[in-house]
Image (cartoon, helix red, strand yellow):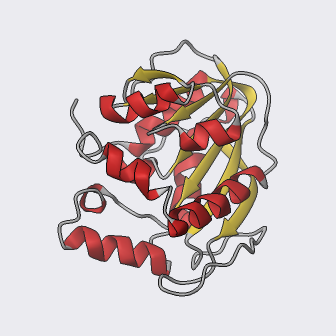
């Protein structure tokens, strides 16, 4: 279950200490919080990485396939379990909230991961997805880097917001709130402004979905 993140965990985590990394992280955290996501109850981050997002959002539990990433998360006080998003090691209806930040783009089977998040959520629980839209200047940059052989981005698949919404709705989730941020293009001065709507040109979009009822679930593979 070795991942590309195992050999890049320290470099990945150190990037957040750079000036650019700090600013981008603050913008992304603002987007996630502005979706009115729940800040109570038992919550899980799927693809917790080094634990920076979980720590900032007050989440105490997380899973990730990278043991090196989990070592950082554990030092931040996260109860970290080595597992994959497609097979969450928790019973049904275990959590009030599940968050996935730039996780689905790196998964072999994102639909299965969304199904698993649906399963472990309580009724009326929330799924919070943070993503880089594939058609945005940032998404196009990462796609280009991936084609050039970048160790991480070469494993990513950056989708549109429309596609992500369809994927989540196909499992039974209902979209509740959207906040877009990172509105300047790569190389331009970073601005902290956010927009409470879908912006496919934004470098980061946070979407909050709700699990309304089991009967709304639709079996459909996209």
| Residue 58 x, y percent position in the rendering | 70, 33
Picture mark count: 0
Q: What residue occupies the far top of the structure in this picture? A: 91
Along the line of sight, the residue nearer the viewer: 84 or 120: 84
Q: What residue occupies the far bottom of the structure in this picture? A: 188
What residue is drawn where x is 43% and y is 20%? 81
Along the line of sight, the residue nearer the viewer: 169 or 208: 208
What residue is drawn where x is 23% and y is 64%? 150
Q: Is residue 186 left or right of residue 175?
A: left
Q: Is residue 202 left or right of residue 209?
A: left
What residue is drawn where x is 45% and y is 71%? 134
215, above or below 27, in the image = above
| Residue 67 x, y percent position in the rendering | 32, 28
Q: Quadrant of residue 92?
A: top right
| Residue 153 x, y percent position in the rendering | 30, 61
Q: Is residue 60 visible?
A: yes
| Residue 1 x, y percent position in the rendering | 22, 29
188, above or below 217, in the image = below
Q: Is residue 49 left or right of residue 94?
A: left
Along the line of sight, the residue nearer the viewer: 81 or 222: 81
Along the line of sight, the residue nearer the viewer: 84 or 109: 84
């Amino acid at each position: 279950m070795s991942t590309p993140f195992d050999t890049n965990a320290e470099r990945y985590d150190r990037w957040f200490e750079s000036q650019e990394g700090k600013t981008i992280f603050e913008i992304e955290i603002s987007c996630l919080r502005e979706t009115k996501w729940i800040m109570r109850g038992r919550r899980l981050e799927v693809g917790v990485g080094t634990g920076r997002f979980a720590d900032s959002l007050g989440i105490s539990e997380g899973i990730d396939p990278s043991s090196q990433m989990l070592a950082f998360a554990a030092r931040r006080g996260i109860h970290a379990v080595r597992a994959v998003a497609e097979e969450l090691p928790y019973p049904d209806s275990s959590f009030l909230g599940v968050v996935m930040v730039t996780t689905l783009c790196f998964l072999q089977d994102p639909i299965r991961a969304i199904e698993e998040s649906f399963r472990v959520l309580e009724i009326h629980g929330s799924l919070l997805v943070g993503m880089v839209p594939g058609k945005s200047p940032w998404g196009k940059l990462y796609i280009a880097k991936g084609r050039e052989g970048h160790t991480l981005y070469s494993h990513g698949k950056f989708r549109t917001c429309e596609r992500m919404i369809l994927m989540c709705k196909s499992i039974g989730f209902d979209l509740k709130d959207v906040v877009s941020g990172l509105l300047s293009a790569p190389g331009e001065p970073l601005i902290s402004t956010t927009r409470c709507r879908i912006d496919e040109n934004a470098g980061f979009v946070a979407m909050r979905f709700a699990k309304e009822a089991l009967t709304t679930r639709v079996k459909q593979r996209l």
